[in-house]
Amino acid sequence: MPRLFTAIEVSNDVDRELNMLVPTTEQSVVQDTKHITLRFIGNVTEAEAAAIELELISVNVASFALTVSGCQFFKSHGAKTIFVTNIMPSAALTDLHQLITAVLLHRGISVEERKYLPHITVARIHRPSDILIDSLLEKGKRVSTALLVTGFVLYCAEHDSTQKYVKRREYIFTKPNT
């Protein structure tokens, strides 16, 4: 069963910049495929995945810019372990999220209960020390960049020995900017 989600891809330049924040250690696992999740879909049958893939073609907005500014930690299992960037609020991003949600509701995929909080996962860190947390947060204060959003991707999450995301389909916006 495919485990799907929609996301905005992060450019290679931004990916490299974010990778430089985290020291390479046994306790830190840098996120390979950097992205901003738009909507988690979950496990679906192959037939449902194919139908969702086709219906997402209807989602079309004008290209827009997002601002990545600063970093923080999210808690996982009660501990600060997920190092992420902040995405500044954007009406265009909210609209895109809502359009995708409407398509998924039409397909019978329920709305997520938690509030949508756009971010880029930089790394997952196993038992980070307070010194490492403080160091990463200090480095994260200097993160400030813009992303041009020209489309989104339908990913399939695969779990072997590690988690990897496979691009199932890419959707490019064709609506003109006004």
Image (cartoon, rainbow, N blue to C red):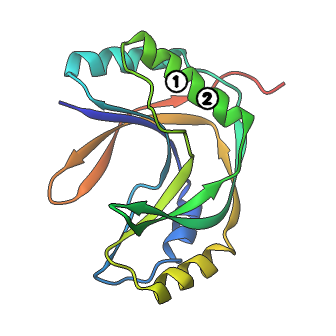
Q: Which residue is more in the foreground, 33 or 12?
A: 33
**Mark 1 surroundings within 10 Å by alpha-carbon count, few (fewer than 14), some (14 through 19), many (20 or more):** many
Q: 138 above or below 44?
A: below
Q: Residue at x 21, y 59 (%)?
A: 162
Q: Which mark is residue 100?
A: 1
The quarter of the rendered structure image containing the N terminus is top left
Instruction: Looking at the picture, tell me which residue is in the foreground, 120 or 154.
Output: 120
- The image position of residue 4, as x and y in percent, is 33, 34
Say which residue appears at 57% left-offset and 70% top-offset: 17
In the visual, does 151 lie left or right of 37? right
- Type of amino acid at the residue the image marks with label 1: Ile
Mark 1 to mark 2 CA distance (whole Å): 6 Å
Which amino acid does the dot numbered 2 rest on? Leu
Q: Quadrant of residue 109?
A: top left
Q: Mark 2 falls on what kind of element?
A: helix
Q: Position of residue 81 (x, y in %)?
A: 40, 69
Instruction: Name the residue tied to disc 2.
Output: 96
Percent position of residue 62, x then y: 71, 27
Q: Residue 171 versus residue 87: which sits nearer the camera?
A: 87
Question: Which residue lies most toward the right here?
Answer: 178
